[in-house]
Amino acid sequence: MGNVLMCCAFLWTFSAPVFGQGKVREFRIVENDTLTYTLKLALNDSGQPQHFFRNIFTPVCYTNECKPVHINFYWDLLGNYERFDLPENKVLTKVDHDEFKQEDYEKLQDILAQSNSIFADLKMEDLITNGTDNLTDSVDAKAGATLKTIKNQVIDGAVYTCYTLWHIAYGTAVPEMKKIIESYQNDALLHRFLLSNNYHYQYWAMEKVMDAKGNVQNAYQTDIEKVISGKNIFIAKNALQRVSGSFFSDTKKQEWIWETFENSPYAMQIAILKKLKTIPVSETLKNNLKSSLTKSNEEQSSLINQILSKQ
């Protein structure tokens, strides 16, 4: 069976890669004495992790009747839910046995994509009347939301299904995915995460390559430059604010930050100017700042003059 690791209430057993449609590594998760399931990690041909997925079978029970639900869930490498699909010839149904329509599947994806769903803090008995799929009379008070808001976050006739599937998407397997991916951490993965379009990956990798004082490991400085000059202004500003002043100490870095400034949107330009207030700037950068005063607005001019006055 392979190595066995005990972690919290989980038991991991690692099987050999399964070959078929790409490579897959399987992790048998034992949640308790009665619940065991297989979490799968998709790998590319080089053995690099791509995403997690799970082929789910779960009963959804109303009154004395239980309906089987077959569905596949996909998460990114840090356990963030991404999407679902259905096995061949399988459909989802409502309490009255009506099959989901296309708009129901689209709404389910919207529901599952909400990490801050009302489902997070509700028990099933708070949500629906026992033995039915009807919302309880007090659900708005329990959820702290209007009835209209709640109805927008459920599918009529499939409230139990929505609740059950959301708790699987954000359930106890998620922290296990994070632990698993830690075992894959290496230089290649960190470079890949930093240059990814997935901001979750970028934040995670920055924590690994930057210390508490904002000092960036040499091997990743070019990656951090690309994050700061990237299109996602939120993570760009975060990286800019976190790096230490020494990151900009050499001439090439100051040439780069000026080029980044000129090509950045206004909000990022302001963030760069605020950062430059905290570090010594080169003569070339000072001259560039002076030259830009004629085309700067009041806020920019004020920051530029503050930078120049400190040199």
Image (spheres, rainbow, N blue to C red):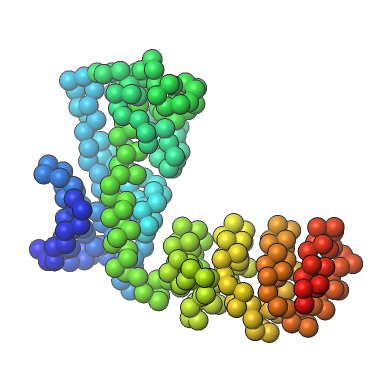
- Residue 265 visible in rendering: no
Horizontally, residue 144 falls left or right of residue 70, namely right
Q: Quadrant of the C terminus?
A: bottom right
Q: Residue at x 19, y 23 (%)?
A: 65
Residue lying at the far right of the rendered structure: 294
- Residue 67 visible in rendering: yes
Horizontally, residue 48 falls left or right of residue 219, namely left
What percent of the width, then of the height, locates residue 164?
A: 30, 34
Front-most of residues 75 and 19: 75
Q: Quadrant of the N terminus?
A: bottom left
What percent of the width, then of the height, locates residue 231?
A: 62, 61
Vertical side of 96 occupied by 222: above or below: below
Vertical side of 194 occupied by 134: above or below: above
What percent of the width, then of the height, locates residue 128?
A: 32, 21
Q: Quadrant of residue 264?
A: bottom right
Front-most of residues 50 and 224: 224
Horizontally, residue 225 falls left or right of residue 286, namely left
Q: Residue at x 43, y 42 (%)?
A: 115
What percent of the width, then of the height, locates residue 22?
A: 29, 64
Q: Residue at x 63, y 68 (%)?
A: 229
Horizontally, residue 81 falls left or right of residue 276, namely left
Q: Quadrant of residue 107?
A: top left
Front-most of residues 7 and 44: 7
